[in-house]
Amino acid sequence: MSEFVQYLVNGLTIGAFLALIALGYSMIYGVVRLINFAHGDVFMIGAFAGFGTLTTLGVTGGTALPAIIAAVVVGALTTGVVGTGIAKVAYVPLLSSPRLAILIAAIGVSLALEEGVKVLTDARFKSYPHALDGGRIFSGAVHVTWGQLTLVLLSVVLMAGLWLFVTRTVTGTAMRALAMDRDAARLQGINVERLILTTFFIGSMLAGAAGVMYGLYYVQISFGMGFLIGLRAFTAAVLGGIGNLPGTMVAGVAIGLVQSFSAGYVSSRWTDVIIFGLLIAVLALRPTGLFGERVVERA
Protein backbone atom coordinates (compact mmCIF):
# COMPACT_ATOMS: atom_id res chain seq x y z
CA MET A 1 0.00 0.00 0.00
CA SER A 2 2.83 2.41 0.81
CA GLU A 3 4.37 1.76 -2.63
CA PHE A 4 1.04 2.52 -4.28
CA VAL A 5 0.69 5.83 -2.43
CA GLN A 6 4.28 6.77 -3.29
CA TYR A 7 3.74 6.06 -6.98
CA LEU A 8 0.49 8.03 -6.79
CA VAL A 9 2.28 11.06 -5.35
CA ASN A 10 5.05 10.84 -7.95
CA GLY A 11 2.52 10.43 -10.77
CA LEU A 12 0.53 13.47 -9.69
CA THR A 13 3.73 15.53 -9.61
CA ILE A 14 4.79 14.42 -13.09
CA GLY A 15 1.24 14.75 -14.43
CA ALA A 16 1.01 18.33 -13.20
CA PHE A 17 3.65 19.66 -15.59
CA LEU A 18 2.69 17.20 -18.35
CA ALA A 19 -0.77 18.75 -18.28
CA LEU A 20 0.73 22.23 -18.73
CA ILE A 21 2.59 21.16 -21.87
CA ALA A 22 -0.47 19.35 -23.22
CA LEU A 23 -2.59 22.46 -22.72
CA GLY A 24 -0.31 24.33 -25.11
CA TYR A 25 -0.84 21.67 -27.78
CA SER A 26 -4.58 21.71 -27.18
CA MET A 27 -4.94 25.51 -27.25
CA ILE A 28 -2.97 25.92 -30.47
CA TYR A 29 -4.83 23.12 -32.21
CA GLY A 30 -8.18 24.39 -31.00
CA VAL A 31 -7.60 27.87 -32.41
CA VAL A 32 -5.36 27.27 -35.44
CA ARG A 33 -6.03 23.56 -36.23
CA LEU A 34 -2.26 23.04 -36.16
CA ILE A 35 -0.23 20.35 -34.43
CA ASN A 36 2.74 22.41 -33.29
CA PHE A 37 5.54 19.84 -33.39
CA ALA A 38 7.96 22.49 -32.13
CA HIS A 39 6.07 22.73 -28.83
CA GLY A 40 8.28 20.14 -27.11
CA ASP A 41 11.36 22.13 -28.11
CA VAL A 42 9.79 25.31 -26.74
CA PHE A 43 9.39 23.39 -23.47
CA MET A 44 13.12 22.55 -23.64
CA ILE A 45 14.05 26.21 -24.14
CA GLY A 46 12.01 27.09 -21.05
CA ALA A 47 14.02 24.56 -19.03
CA PHE A 48 17.29 26.18 -20.14
CA ALA A 49 15.96 29.67 -19.41
CA GLY A 50 15.03 28.57 -15.88
CA PHE A 51 18.46 26.98 -15.45
CA GLY A 52 20.12 30.24 -16.45
CA THR A 53 17.96 32.20 -14.02
CA LEU A 54 18.68 29.95 -11.03
CA THR A 55 22.39 29.90 -11.84
CA THR A 56 22.49 33.68 -12.11
CA LEU A 57 20.71 34.02 -8.76
CA GLY A 58 23.27 31.71 -7.19
CA VAL A 59 20.79 29.12 -5.90
CA THR A 60 22.57 26.03 -4.53
CA GLY A 61 20.16 24.21 -2.20
CA GLY A 62 17.04 24.37 -0.08
CA THR A 63 13.55 25.31 -1.24
CA ALA A 64 14.24 28.84 -2.48
CA LEU A 65 10.65 29.75 -3.33
CA PRO A 66 11.31 33.32 -4.60
CA ALA A 67 14.07 32.03 -6.89
CA ILE A 68 11.84 29.20 -8.13
CA ILE A 69 9.04 31.63 -8.95
CA ALA A 70 11.53 33.93 -10.69
CA ALA A 71 12.83 31.01 -12.76
CA VAL A 72 9.28 29.97 -13.73
CA VAL A 73 8.39 33.54 -14.72
CA VAL A 74 11.57 34.01 -16.79
CA GLY A 75 11.16 30.61 -18.43
CA ALA A 76 7.53 31.32 -19.25
CA LEU A 77 8.17 34.80 -20.65
CA THR A 78 11.15 33.60 -22.69
CA THR A 79 9.19 30.81 -24.33
CA GLY A 80 6.19 33.08 -24.78
CA VAL A 81 8.33 35.41 -26.88
CA VAL A 82 9.95 32.48 -28.73
CA GLY A 83 6.56 30.89 -29.45
CA THR A 84 5.11 34.15 -30.71
CA GLY A 85 8.13 34.69 -32.95
CA ILE A 86 7.79 31.18 -34.37
CA ALA A 87 4.12 31.74 -35.12
CA LYS A 88 4.76 35.15 -36.71
CA VAL A 89 7.59 33.94 -38.95
CA ALA A 90 6.75 30.33 -39.76
CA TYR A 91 3.04 29.67 -39.23
CA VAL A 92 0.88 32.75 -39.80
CA PRO A 93 2.16 33.31 -43.38
CA LEU A 94 1.16 29.71 -44.20
CA LEU A 95 -2.34 29.68 -42.70
CA SER A 96 -3.97 29.83 -46.12
CA SER A 97 -1.56 27.25 -47.59
CA PRO A 98 -2.21 23.48 -47.75
CA ARG A 99 -2.00 21.68 -44.40
CA LEU A 100 1.11 19.79 -45.51
CA ALA A 101 3.08 23.04 -45.90
CA ILE A 102 2.45 24.19 -42.33
CA LEU A 103 3.13 20.68 -41.02
CA ILE A 104 6.52 20.63 -42.72
CA ALA A 105 7.23 24.11 -41.34
CA ALA A 106 6.46 22.88 -37.81
CA ILE A 107 8.88 19.96 -38.19
CA GLY A 108 11.53 22.32 -39.58
CA VAL A 109 11.13 24.73 -36.66
CA SER A 110 11.42 21.84 -34.21
CA LEU A 111 14.69 20.65 -35.74
CA ALA A 112 16.06 24.21 -35.94
CA LEU A 113 15.38 24.86 -32.23
CA GLU A 114 16.82 21.53 -31.12
CA GLU A 115 19.97 21.81 -33.22
CA GLY A 116 20.42 25.47 -32.26
CA VAL A 117 20.38 24.68 -28.54
CA LYS A 118 22.64 21.68 -29.20
CA VAL A 119 25.27 23.99 -30.71
CA LEU A 120 24.91 26.62 -27.99
CA THR A 121 25.30 24.07 -25.18
CA ASP A 122 27.95 21.91 -26.93
CA ALA A 123 25.48 19.01 -26.63
CA ARG A 124 26.15 18.80 -22.89
CA PHE A 125 23.73 17.95 -20.12
CA LYS A 126 23.11 20.69 -17.58
CA SER A 127 22.42 20.01 -13.91
CA TYR A 128 19.81 22.19 -12.22
CA PRO A 129 20.60 23.65 -8.80
CA HIS A 130 18.92 21.63 -6.04
CA ALA A 131 16.35 24.32 -5.39
CA LEU A 132 13.70 21.89 -4.10
CA ASP A 133 15.76 20.34 -1.30
CA GLY A 134 13.67 21.82 1.45
CA GLY A 135 12.91 18.68 3.44
CA ARG A 136 9.95 16.35 3.57
CA ILE A 137 6.35 16.79 4.63
CA PHE A 138 6.01 13.06 5.27
CA SER A 139 8.78 10.52 5.64
CA GLY A 140 8.99 6.84 6.37
CA ALA A 141 7.20 4.48 4.00
CA VAL A 142 5.85 7.38 1.88
CA HIS A 143 8.02 10.36 0.96
CA VAL A 144 6.29 13.63 0.09
CA THR A 145 8.58 16.62 -0.24
CA TRP A 146 7.91 20.33 -0.09
CA GLY A 147 9.35 20.48 -3.60
CA GLN A 148 6.68 18.15 -4.97
CA LEU A 149 3.96 20.16 -3.26
CA THR A 150 5.41 23.37 -4.69
CA LEU A 151 5.39 22.05 -8.26
CA VAL A 152 1.84 20.74 -8.00
CA LEU A 153 0.54 23.98 -6.51
CA LEU A 154 2.27 26.09 -9.18
CA SER A 155 0.75 23.89 -11.88
CA VAL A 156 -2.72 24.14 -10.37
CA VAL A 157 -2.43 27.92 -10.14
CA LEU A 158 -1.38 28.16 -13.81
CA MET A 159 -4.13 25.82 -14.98
CA ALA A 160 -6.75 27.67 -12.95
CA GLY A 161 -5.48 30.98 -14.33
CA LEU A 162 -5.74 29.66 -17.88
CA TRP A 163 -9.27 28.41 -17.31
CA LEU A 164 -10.37 31.77 -15.86
CA PHE A 165 -8.70 33.61 -18.75
CA VAL A 166 -10.42 31.50 -21.40
CA THR A 167 -13.85 31.56 -19.78
CA ARG A 168 -14.00 34.98 -18.10
CA THR A 169 -12.19 37.45 -20.35
CA VAL A 170 -13.03 39.11 -23.66
CA THR A 171 -9.87 37.73 -25.27
CA GLY A 172 -10.72 34.24 -24.05
CA THR A 173 -14.20 34.53 -25.51
CA ALA A 174 -12.69 35.66 -28.82
CA MET A 175 -10.40 32.62 -28.76
CA ARG A 176 -13.36 30.31 -28.35
CA ALA A 177 -15.16 32.07 -31.18
CA LEU A 178 -12.09 31.72 -33.40
CA ALA A 179 -11.87 28.02 -32.55
CA MET A 180 -15.48 27.55 -33.70
CA ASP A 181 -15.30 29.44 -36.99
CA ARG A 182 -12.40 31.58 -38.20
CA ASP A 183 -14.33 33.34 -40.96
CA ALA A 184 -17.28 34.18 -38.72
CA ALA A 185 -14.89 35.49 -36.06
CA ARG A 186 -13.23 37.74 -38.64
CA LEU A 187 -16.64 39.08 -39.71
CA GLN A 188 -17.38 39.92 -36.08
CA GLY A 189 -14.36 42.23 -36.04
CA ILE A 190 -11.90 39.90 -34.30
CA ASN A 191 -8.27 40.46 -35.26
CA VAL A 192 -7.53 36.85 -36.18
CA GLU A 193 -3.76 37.18 -36.63
CA ARG A 194 -3.26 38.98 -33.35
CA LEU A 195 -5.41 36.42 -31.54
CA ILE A 196 -3.42 33.54 -33.03
CA LEU A 197 -0.20 35.16 -31.81
CA THR A 198 -1.76 35.59 -28.36
CA THR A 199 -2.67 31.91 -28.32
CA PHE A 200 0.89 30.92 -29.19
CA PHE A 201 2.21 33.27 -26.52
CA ILE A 202 0.04 31.75 -23.78
CA GLY A 203 0.53 28.15 -24.89
CA SER A 204 4.29 28.62 -25.11
CA MET A 205 4.37 30.27 -21.68
CA LEU A 206 2.75 27.19 -20.17
CA ALA A 207 5.34 24.96 -21.87
CA GLY A 208 8.17 27.16 -20.57
CA ALA A 209 6.86 27.04 -17.01
CA ALA A 210 6.59 23.25 -17.31
CA GLY A 211 10.18 23.12 -18.58
CA VAL A 212 11.44 24.83 -15.44
CA MET A 213 9.40 22.46 -13.26
CA TYR A 214 10.81 19.48 -15.14
CA GLY A 215 14.35 20.71 -14.54
CA LEU A 216 13.67 21.28 -10.85
CA TYR A 217 12.19 17.79 -10.48
CA TYR A 218 14.57 15.70 -12.62
CA VAL A 219 17.63 17.98 -12.13
CA GLN A 220 19.23 17.14 -15.50
CA ILE A 221 18.24 18.79 -18.78
CA SER A 222 19.54 18.49 -22.34
CA PHE A 223 18.86 19.78 -25.87
CA GLY A 224 17.00 16.57 -26.81
CA MET A 225 14.63 16.45 -23.84
CA GLY A 226 11.73 18.05 -25.69
CA PHE A 227 11.11 15.21 -28.14
CA LEU A 228 9.91 12.42 -25.84
CA ILE A 229 8.23 14.64 -23.25
CA GLY A 230 6.52 16.48 -26.11
CA LEU A 231 5.19 13.21 -27.49
CA ARG A 232 3.83 12.22 -24.09
CA ALA A 233 2.16 15.61 -23.67
CA PHE A 234 0.74 15.38 -27.20
CA THR A 235 -0.64 11.96 -26.28
CA ALA A 236 -2.33 13.55 -23.27
CA ALA A 237 -3.84 16.28 -25.47
CA VAL A 238 -5.21 13.68 -27.89
CA LEU A 239 -6.50 11.41 -25.13
CA GLY A 240 -8.32 14.28 -23.47
CA GLY A 241 -9.89 15.39 -26.74
CA ILE A 242 -7.54 17.85 -28.40
CA GLY A 243 -8.98 21.35 -28.14
CA ASN A 244 -10.81 20.43 -24.92
CA LEU A 245 -8.95 22.16 -22.07
CA PRO A 246 -10.51 20.37 -19.05
CA GLY A 247 -10.11 17.02 -20.80
CA THR A 248 -6.48 17.81 -21.56
CA MET A 249 -5.78 18.65 -17.91
CA VAL A 250 -7.29 15.37 -16.73
CA ALA A 251 -5.48 13.35 -19.41
CA GLY A 252 -2.14 15.01 -18.60
CA VAL A 253 -2.42 13.96 -14.96
CA ALA A 254 -3.54 10.48 -16.08
CA ILE A 255 -0.46 10.07 -18.30
CA GLY A 256 1.73 11.12 -15.38
CA LEU A 257 0.11 8.43 -13.23
CA VAL A 258 0.53 5.81 -15.97
CA GLN A 259 4.21 6.77 -16.26
CA SER A 260 4.76 6.47 -12.52
CA PHE A 261 2.87 3.21 -11.99
CA SER A 262 4.31 1.51 -15.08
CA ALA A 263 7.86 2.40 -14.04
CA GLY A 264 7.17 1.19 -10.49
CA TYR A 265 5.25 -2.01 -11.10
CA VAL A 266 6.51 -3.06 -14.55
CA SER A 267 9.70 -1.37 -15.82
CA SER A 268 10.65 2.09 -17.03
CA ARG A 269 11.61 0.47 -20.35
CA TRP A 270 7.95 -0.37 -20.91
CA THR A 271 6.59 3.06 -19.97
CA ASP A 272 6.30 4.46 -23.49
CA VAL A 273 4.97 1.16 -24.83
CA ILE A 274 2.16 1.33 -22.29
CA ILE A 275 1.45 5.04 -22.82
CA PHE A 276 1.27 4.87 -26.62
CA GLY A 277 -0.53 1.52 -26.49
CA LEU A 278 -3.14 3.20 -24.30
CA LEU A 279 -3.42 5.99 -26.88
CA ILE A 280 -4.06 3.50 -29.68
CA ALA A 281 -6.64 1.62 -27.61
CA VAL A 282 -8.57 4.76 -26.64
CA LEU A 283 -8.59 6.17 -30.19
CA ALA A 284 -9.74 2.81 -31.58
CA LEU A 285 -12.79 2.98 -29.31
CA ARG A 286 -13.28 6.77 -29.25
CA PRO A 287 -11.46 8.63 -32.05
CA THR A 288 -12.27 12.05 -30.58
CA GLY A 289 -10.56 11.24 -27.27
CA LEU A 290 -12.10 10.70 -23.87
CA PHE A 291 -13.64 14.16 -23.59
CA GLY A 292 -13.68 15.30 -27.21
CA GLU A 293 -16.69 16.01 -29.33
CA ARG A 294 -17.17 15.44 -33.03
CA VAL A 295 -16.71 18.64 -34.99
CA VAL A 296 -17.35 19.50 -38.61
CA GLU A 297 -14.15 20.34 -40.48
CA ARG A 298 -14.45 23.61 -42.40
CA ALA A 299 -12.52 24.28 -45.54
Image (spheres, rainbow, N blue to C red):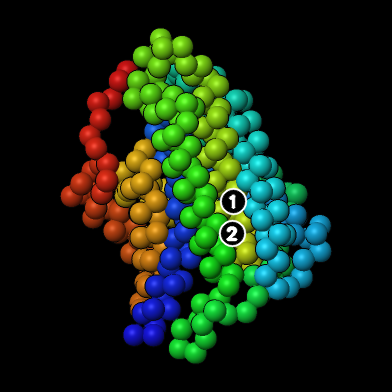
Instruction: Give whichever of 40, 99 is nearer the camera.
Output: 40
Residue in view at x 34 percent, y 25 percent: 180
Q: Position of residue 158 (x, y in %)?
A: 52, 49
Residue in view at x 52 percent, y 40 percent: 203
Q: Amino acid at mark 1?
A: Ala
Instruction: Give whichever of 50, 232 is nearer the camera.
Output: 50
Q: Is there CB contact under 8 Å for labels 1 and 2?
A: yes
Residue in view at x 38 percent, y 66 percent: 257
Can you say whether 35 is above or below 47 in the image?
A: above
Can you say whether 222 is above or below 196 in the image?
A: below
Instruction: Give whichever of 182, 152 is nearer the camera.
Output: 152
Quadrant that contains the N terminus:
bottom left
Residue designated by label 2: 213
Residue designated by label 1: 209
Please give left or right for residue 14 compared with residue 5 in the image.
right
At mark 1, the secondary structure is helix
Can you say whether 17 is above or below 163 in the image?
A: below
- For the residues marked 1 and 2, what is the alpha-carbon distance in whole angstroms? 6 Å
At mark 2, the secondary structure is helix
Residue 112 can be seen, yes or no: no
Instruction: Give whichever of 100, 53 is nearer the camera.
Output: 53
Can you say whether 1 is above or below 222 in the image?
A: below
Quadrant of residue 23 within the rendered picture: top left
Q: Position of residue 7 (x, y in %)?
A: 41, 75
In the image, farthest residue toward the front: 168
Quadrant of residue 38 within the rendered picture: top right
Q: How many marks?
A: 2
